[in-house]
Amino acid sequence: MANNHTNYKTVYAFAREMHPKTEKFDVQYGTAGFRAKANTLGYVMYRMGLLAVLRARYKKACIGAMITASHNPEPDNGVKLIDPCGEMLEQSWEAWATKFANVADDRLEELITEIVSELGIEMTQRVEILVGKDTRPSSPSLAKALCDGILALSGKPIDYGIVTTPQLHYFVYCRNTHHQYGTPTEEGYYTKLCSAFKKIRGNTFNFNNYKNKLLYDGANGVGAKKIKYFQECLGETLKIDRYNDELIGTGKLNYLCGADYVKTKQTFPNGVPKEVGQRCCSVDGDADRLMYYYLDENEKFHLLDGDRIAILIAEYLKDLVQNIGFSVNLGIVQTAYANGASTDYITNTLKIPVSFVCTGVKYLHHEAQKYDIGVYFEANGHGTVVFKKEFKEKIHSSLSSPDVSNEAKSKIEKIKTVIDLINETVGDALSDLLLVETILHSKGWSIQDWEKCYDDLPNCLMKVSVKDRNKITTTNAERTCVKPEGLQQEIDNIVKKYKAGRSFVRPSGTEDLIRVYAEAAIKEEADQLALDVALKVYEMAEGIGPKPTL
């Protein structure tokens, strides 16, 4: 395998013998990579190991491969590839990933030859693939299959063991910037984030209505393990009470807990005590989503989701960049799932530009990069802040400029520290947690103070099982249904019946499901609106199984 004319029969032979294609159905690489029942993924992992080496050689850089199914149940697993700057796999390569996963065993070597020839990949370079995995019992054996694929094309797997998905994104970027972004180790990650957090906070742990105690739901996943290191680093700066940190293999990963459960069920996760007024948060199984919530005096549950996190961060940064000597283009990126009240607050109160894109972090991340400072969050709690290279260069040069006032330089120093607190590569629940706590502390806010910014419109999410999800297509950042013909008109007619009504439908990226979102002035009407639309989808998009109900 020394050059582009390599015979790949050994790759095929090993695949046939050790990792044969066992499933007849096709799988598709999406925003979340591949996800399925863990016992069906051995051959997919092997082939993604092959593709990872090809991608790394094409980019002439190290890339990552993360084995996780995020917020899915414990029997599931998956894999996604991470590009050199820590971002999601380039969209044009998703098609190659899908081809590699579905090609017959006896055509695997032919497909490798095709991609090498078509893209002019030089096969002599020794490349590194960083491998991470979550806490699922299936992850070690799937990691072995992945590494077999990497080795089959003479790549070098570097096993980081059990890490959060955002940590692996971080490590990839650190290695490709030759440690300029940070040290590509867990210790380097914790040190960078915790040092920035403590530097901003100073010696005052409690301030006005802010109390430095947080109840933390780790979803019985990797985030439950890694938060312990933050506790050690932060000491008394932030007191974190941990819940849902059961051992690997208990079957409790994401079960009745975690960010996705809290968001979809709008209730406390199992195990977290219901202390009135106490600030709580949940992460998901691979620690890339974050939700905040609390219980009021009337035992009512209050959720502060990704929309509110984005607004909290954007407002803080807007204040921070005022009067620093140059103008800054700050914007927020949302999806159709963003609550209408949040968009109204961003536009009319904060006066911050807001962009809409399709669901999927890759779309939000790309759009956010158009701003000097781009804040993006999905309502599900997955998001971060990205800073343009030119903006970073500007703040560095301003610190040494005699034309910039000392007051402005003090603000710029704080901005630099805030940047160090943020994992720009991808949404990172642990980094986002520290950022939220930093902002609440600086404002002297309780979680109730934070919630007072605006009132969410009640909303409801539903799913409709269909024969083929591809029967529904959308446009306008997924807010308008194009096919089947006539469905959007039916949705519009239904929405008109409800005060402050809004609803949209979109196909799932991984399953034959259609997702329905609805919001209205009161909760009962939001629920009924969602049901009305779901029933119309069932009728017009070949629904299967029982009809939707509340």
Image (spheres, grey):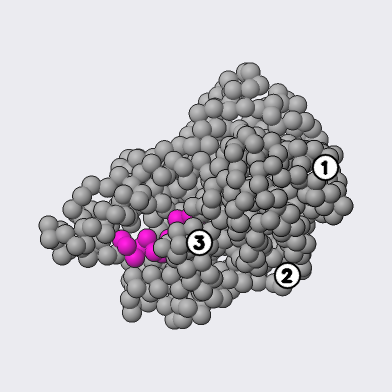
Contact check, label 1 and label 3, Cβ < 8 Å: no
Task: Kindly report the distance in space between the C-alpha atoms of the residues bearing marks 2 and 3.
Answer: 29 Å
Precedes in sequence: disc 2 or disc 1: 1
Location of the C terminus (image quadrant): top right
Q: Secondary structure at mark 1?
A: helix
In-image side of 108 versus 80 (left or right): right
Task: Pinpoint residue 210: horizontal percent, then vertical percent.
Answer: 38, 70
Precedes in sequence: disc 1 or disc 3: 1
Nearer to me, 255 or 497: 255
Q: Residue at x 36, y 49 (%)?
A: 388
Does residue 433 show up magenta in the picture? no
Mark 2 or mark 1: which is in front? 1
Which residue position holds label 2? 248
Q: Residue at x 54, y 71 (%)?
A: 186
Q: Is residue 320 visible?
A: yes
Task: Kindly report the distance in space between the C-alpha atoms of the residues bearing marks 1 and 3.
Answer: 34 Å
Task: Kindly report the distance in space between the C-alpha atoms of the residues bearing marks 2 and 1.
Answer: 33 Å
Residue farthest to the left, as pictured: 403
Q: Secondary structure at mark 2?
A: loop
What is the magenta range?
A: 415-429
Task: Pinpoint residue 220: horizontal percent, then vertical percent.
Answer: 67, 67
Quadrant in the rendering for residue 359: top right
| Residue 105 image label | 1
Which residue position holds label 3? 175
Q: Residue at x 51, y 66 (%)?
A: 184
CA neighbours of label 3 inside 10 A, class few (<14), some (14 to 19), many (20+): many
CA neighbours of label 1 inside 10 A, class few (<14), some (14 to 19), many (20+): many
Task: Pinpoint residue 154: horizontal percent, then vertical percent.
Answer: 68, 56
